[in-house]
Image (cartoon, rainbow, N blue to C red):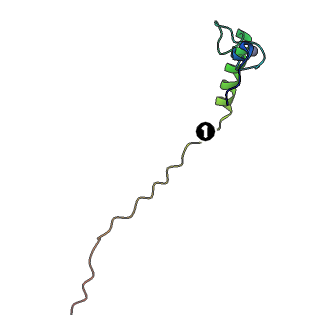
Amino acid sequence: MSQPVPPEDRTPKCAQCHKKPVSAQYRPFCSKRCADVDLAKWLNEGYAIPGSAAEDADETPPPAGSGEMSADD
Ligand SMILES: [Zn+2]
């Protein structure tokens, strides 16, 4: 199944607004505006992510072999 794709559809659209064709200068965006919007979005998402610091479950077992009980009498 191969459908002929019109040249217009082959032009990559802006990754931000998906409306305007990508500019060679600001690809994959159409303009600096869209590039800034995407960048801000990424930054916001980065800051929005709560510090999910993995709690280190450090279970140190007590030292074994403290003494053998030998009831031999
Ligand atoms: Zn755009």
Residue ranking furthest to the bottom = 73
Q: Residue at x 68, y 8 (%)?
A: 23
Residue 16 in the image: above or below residue 22: below
Q: Element at badge 1?
A: loop
Residue 50 in the image: above or below residue 46: below
Task: Tell me the kind of residue under disc 1.
Answer: Gly
Determine the image quadrant of residue 32: top right
Q: Residue at x 29, y 70 (%)?
A: 65
Residue ranking furthest to the top = 25
Determine the image quadrant of residue 51: top right
Image coords of residue 22 (percent x, y): 69, 12
Of residues 68 and 3, the one nearer the viewer is 3
Quick one: label 1, few (<14), some, or many (20+) residues within 10 Å? few
Q: Residue at x 76, y 20 (%)?
A: 18
Whether the residue carrying mark 1 lies under 8 Å from ligand 1 is answered with no
Image coords of residue 14 (percent x, y): 72, 17
Determine the image quadrant of residue 24: top right
Marks counted in the figure total: 1
Image coords of residue 59 (percent x, y): 45, 58
Residue assigned mark 1: 51
Quarter of the picture containing the C terminus is bottom left
Quarter of the picture containing the N terminus is top right
Of residues 63 and 11, the one nearer the viewer is 11
Q: Residue at x 74, y 11 (%)?
A: 33
Residue ranking furthest to the left = 73
Residue 50 in the image: above or below residue 11: below
Q: Is residue 50 left or right of residue 66?
A: right
- Split into quadrants, the picture shows ligand 1 in the one at top right
Residue ranking furthest to the right = 19
Residue 24 in the image: above or below residue 1: above
